[in-house]
Image: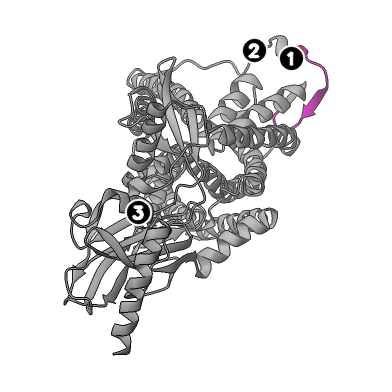
């Protein structure tokens, strides 16, 4: 049952890893969320060095995004020009992120920054998700929800370098998706997540893209950004553990299949509340670990010379 | 007998050596070996036991005790200390112990204080207290230095890499002895030195040392070397595996 991870330099129970990968895969299949923001902290909890967890999860996200984007591609739900602009931003962002990661690793602060990022983002997502799903649940009780406006015009639409994005039915400055792509790229590199939870709302609310093309286009960007993160992490920090990666892949594939089947049969809104509570739970656990005084103030530096 | 003669002359030589130098060249009236000289860390590795065994020369009759030490490779160990900054515990200080071994354990037939004098422990460098553990910091006060040193020992012990208690060496007869060395899954790779000492009247009377090599082997070793020697190619291959896996699961998913 034990398998030695050559890069993480530790031995783990491979049934446990595949099981965890499957559990997170089920959740992502059910809710259509990328599993990175749950899988990476779970890897921390079982003792995988955060640097290895983040880089290896990036590789795993490449796989899940490839299988996800193909389905959207077939239905023509990928805005390629928009995807390319986001990807350019994402490339720059993730390259910056990996360098930042490397500097933080040198300073011995990488674990702290990763965990702080998680506390902040999981707190925000979990909170928003909870509020949204409770509201949606309530509105189901009352009939006739109000329809929201597609998007409003703000100063954002006055920026230069305007480009036409046919599928998104948008004529906006390329700077905006470029910047969003960059920001998501930095987060992706540091946190080992696809960044869909930032990218998707940004595309809907900031760019005003139609929901139909949002998921496919975000997956398109995530694939290329995560490929960049994986190669750069492997090159700069040597923290991609392919053995762990393959275990996660196996679990993820099994889980996503099950999740999609289960998800179609269950009531989404109540489950969404559960997912939100889970996200908040992980957030609180990570947060407490940072705030509560550790039993021993001293610790061994992992792989540090 | 030849062997007795050898032993006798060795004791004389030993006495001489002890008079003139505190060094650790002792006679070999202990003959020892390991159940394996090489510990391969393979894909299924989850720790292993190595049997350390040997025989002492009983010619100058009984009452000898045996001490066995296991010292891992010295590549330096870094310890970090957390402080509270704005409510959050962050690593604020660190110290590098350059000569700290990555693994240490000691075994003896009886508690050390009963069989050997502290001075002798020091000159033969037996026991965790005798390791030359010093921070490369240089600016620490003796108290602070001690605090860091204790933190090192404590953390290494928690990681199962140091044994601060002394394990048991079992005498099977008045000649044969054995002890089991457990190497946990997280053992550092490198060359270990196993020291066998025979002790009589508070003094080391015989010593032998032997290397034990721990290294990654098989697929795991290959992956590790590949990831460190051709990191770019390694990264590309990881990505290709992920793309193929993603495509394959899409195909499987579409069919069902």
The spot of residue B82 in percent (x, y) is 42, 27
- Looking at the image, residue A19 sits to the left or right of residue A52; the answer is left
Q: Residue furthest right?
A: A161
Quick check: A218 above or below A284?
A: below
SS state under label 2: loop
The mark that comes first in sequence, 2 or 3, is 3
Between the residue at mark 2 and the residue at mark 1, the CA separation in whole angstroms equals: 10 Å
A259, above or below B254, in the image? above
Place of residue A297 in the rendered image (x, y in percent of width and height, measured from the top left)? 37, 29
Q: Which residues are magenta?
A: A157-169
Mark 1, residue position: A157
Looking at the rendered structure, which numbered label has been put on residue A16?
A: 3
Of B187 and B104, the residue lying toward us: B104
Q: Which of the two labelled residues, at mark 3 and mark 1, occupies the earlier sequence position?
A: 3
- Looking at the image, can residue B40 be seen? no
Between circles 2 and 3, the one closer to the viewer is 3
- Chain name for mark 3: A
């Amino acid at each position: 049952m034990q398998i030695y991870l050559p890069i993480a330099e530790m031995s783990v129970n491979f049934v446990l890893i595949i099981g965890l990968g499957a559990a997170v895969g089920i959740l992502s299949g059910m809710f259509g969320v990328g599993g990175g923001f749950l899988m990476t902290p779970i890897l921390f909890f079982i003792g995988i060095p955060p640097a290895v967890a983040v880089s290896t999860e990036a590789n795993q996200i490449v796989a899940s995004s490839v299988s996800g984007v193909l389905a959207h591609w077939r239905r023509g739900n990928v805005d390629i020009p928009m995807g390319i602009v986001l990807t350019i931003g994402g490339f720059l962002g993730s390259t910056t992120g990996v360098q930042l990661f490397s500097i933080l690793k040198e300073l011995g602060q990488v674990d702290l920054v990763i965990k702080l990022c998680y506390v902040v983002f999981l707190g925000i997502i979990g909170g928003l998700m909870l509020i949204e799903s409770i509201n949606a649940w309530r509105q189901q009780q009352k009939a006739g929800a109000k329809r929201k406006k597609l998007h409003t015009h703000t100063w954002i639409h006055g920026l230069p370098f305007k480009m036409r994005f046919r599928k998104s039915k948008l004529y906006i400055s390329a700077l905006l998706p470029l910047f969003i792509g960059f920001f998501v790229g930095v987060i992706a590199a540091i946190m080992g997540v696809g960044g869909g939870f930032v990218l998707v709302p940004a595309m809907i609310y900031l760019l005003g893209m139609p929901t139909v093309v949002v998921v496919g286009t975000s997956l398109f960007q995530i694939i290329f950004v995560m490929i960049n993160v994986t190669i750069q992490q492997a090159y700069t920090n040597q923290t991609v553990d392919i053995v762990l990666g393959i275990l996660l892949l196996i679990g993820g594939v099994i889980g996503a299949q099950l999740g999609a089947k289960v998800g179609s049969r269950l009531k989404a809104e109540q489950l969404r509340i559960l997912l939100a509570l889970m996200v908040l739970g992980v957030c609180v656990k990570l947060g407490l670990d940072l705030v509560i005084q550790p039993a021993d103030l001293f610790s061994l530096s992992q792989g540090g010379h | 007998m030849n062997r007795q003669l050898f032993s006798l002359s060795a004791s004389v030589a030993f006495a001489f050596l002890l008079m003139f130098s505190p060094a650790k060249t002792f006679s070999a009236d202990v003959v020892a070996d390991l159940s394996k000289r090489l510990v391969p860390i393979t894909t299924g590795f989850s720790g292993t036991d190595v049997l350390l065994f040997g025989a002492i020369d009983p010619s100058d009759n009984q009452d000898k005790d045996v001490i066995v030490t296991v010292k891992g490779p010295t590549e330096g160990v870094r310890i970090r200390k957390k402080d509270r900054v704005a409510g959050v515990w962050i690593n604020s200080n660190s110290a590098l112990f350059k000569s700290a071994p990555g693994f240490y354990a000691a075994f003896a037939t009886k508690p050390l204080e009963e069989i050997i004098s502290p001075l002798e422990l020091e000159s033969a460098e037996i026991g965790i207290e005798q390791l030359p553990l010093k921070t490369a910091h240089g600016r620490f006060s003796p108290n602070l230095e001690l605090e860091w040193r204790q933190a090192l020992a404590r953390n290494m012990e928690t990681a199962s890499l140091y044994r601060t208690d002394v394990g048991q060496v079992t005498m099977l007869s008045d000649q044969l002895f054995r002890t089991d060395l457990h190497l946990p899954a997280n053992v550092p790779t490198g060359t270990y030195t196993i020291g066998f000492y025979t002790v009589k009247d508070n003094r080391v009377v015989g010593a032998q040392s032997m290397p034990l090599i721990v290294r990654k082997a098989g697929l795991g070793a290959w992956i590790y070397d590949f990831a460190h020697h051709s990191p770019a190619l390694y990264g590309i291959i990881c990505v290709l595996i992920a793309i193929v896996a993603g495509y394959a699961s899409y195909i499987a998913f579409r069919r069902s």
